[in-house]
Amino acid sequence: MFKSTLIISTAFMLMSTLASAQGLDSPLNNSLNEHNVAQSTVRATAAASRDVDASVILVAEAPTQMAAGENVEKVEKMVKKADLMKPSIHSDWTDILQSYVGAPDSNGLAHFNYADLKADTADKAKLDGYIESLEAMNPDSLSDNEAIAFWANLYNAVTIQVIVDNYPIKSIKKLGSFNSGPWKKDLVTINGKKMSLNDIEHGTLRKNYPNPAYVHYMVNCASIGCPNLLNEAWEADTLEAKRKEAAAAYINSPRGAMAEGNDLTVSSIYDWFQEDFGGNKASVIEHLRTYATGDLADAIKNGATIDDFDYDWSLNE
């Protein structure tokens, strides 16, 4: 960090020297004054960045470009670019997902390797540490998409943590009396408030943010019947595209919807949370139509209706 700060400071000393050499009325000096690019601001930016080398390289290039007539806006853009290159707060969660989520099988199911994660003490510690890092944050300070990603990642990570802590089990429902599961138990603390998985999914994600239907493609209850865990964390900048991809993948898998003639068997998710999909079977079919392909799309086009709902609570291992 000392070397990084030294290089950044040197860069701005050179800029100031160039400005002085060109005169008080030079474009470079005026630009420096106009934009008030202080060394302390850049030091703070670099110190806040976990990818310091990128910040150093980008900012250290500034004197040459300034000498070529570039203005300070270029430097500001460099600093912003360096900030964008910082690792995500969800990078540890992505590491875990990429290590333990398998490629979808012939039925489109992505299995999670709970046994290997339980056996790897370093990765289990990484998972626990990631959840603790989210508990230390204030999601109220985030944009809507950042907050949606925050809550969905927290839900999924805590669910994996609960399964691994109690593995081996056959179903998440076994983690509560009378097959009630762990969903009502207080498992995390956010902003000083103890929260359950139900608080996260139903009291926060579905309640406070637009398009609650897509929440169901983002949260995973460690079951075969659920939409897949992605092999990467949810991120604000790719949120909309990724959850539409997740919706399409689920709907076109046997777990989401199957057609037999004009009869559709669809996931019980579309029954339990029908209100999120328009409030009736016809609106559910319209939602399915948006993403359906192949035989499913043909069946819906030909007037197929929902005949049954189904869900498999077996562990997605």
Image (cartoon, helix red, strand yellow):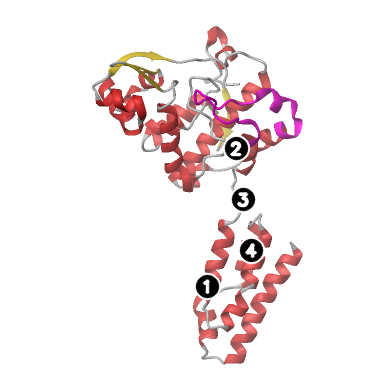
Compare marks 1 and 2 and give the one earlier in the sequence.
1
Q: Position of residue 60 (x, y in %)?
A: 65, 72
**Mark 3: few/some/many CA within 10 Å (<14, 14-19, 20+):** few
Asked if 106 appears above or below 15 in the picture, the reply is above
Q: Secondary structure at mark 1?
A: helix
Determine whether, in the image, residue 29 is placed left or right of residue 169: left
Query: For the residue marked with disc 4, what is the amino acid?
Result: Ser
Q: Where does the C terminus fall, quadrant-wise?
A: top right
Query: Which is nearer the N-term, disc 3 or disc 2?
Result: 3
Tell me if mark 1 has few (under 14), some (14-19) or many (20+) residues whose alpha carbon lies within 10 angstroms of its own: some
Identify residue for label 3.
87
Q: Which is more N-terminal, label 4 or label 3? A: 4
- Farthest residue toward the top? 178
* Badge 3 vs badge 2, beta-carbon distance below 8 Å: no
Residue tagged by mark 4?
Answer: 55
* Residue 74 circle label: 1
State which region is magenta. Answer: 98-124
Q: Is 65 on the left or on the right of 5, as rendered?
A: left
Disc with the residue nearer the chain's start (4 vs 2):
4
**C-alpha gap between disc 1 and disc 2:** 37 Å
Residue 312 in the image, given as x and y percentages of width and height:
49, 15
Q: What's the CA distance linking mark 3 and mark 4?
A: 12 Å
Q: Quadrant of residue 251?
A: top left
Q: Quadrant of residue 66?
A: bottom right
The residue singled out by tag 2 in the image is 135
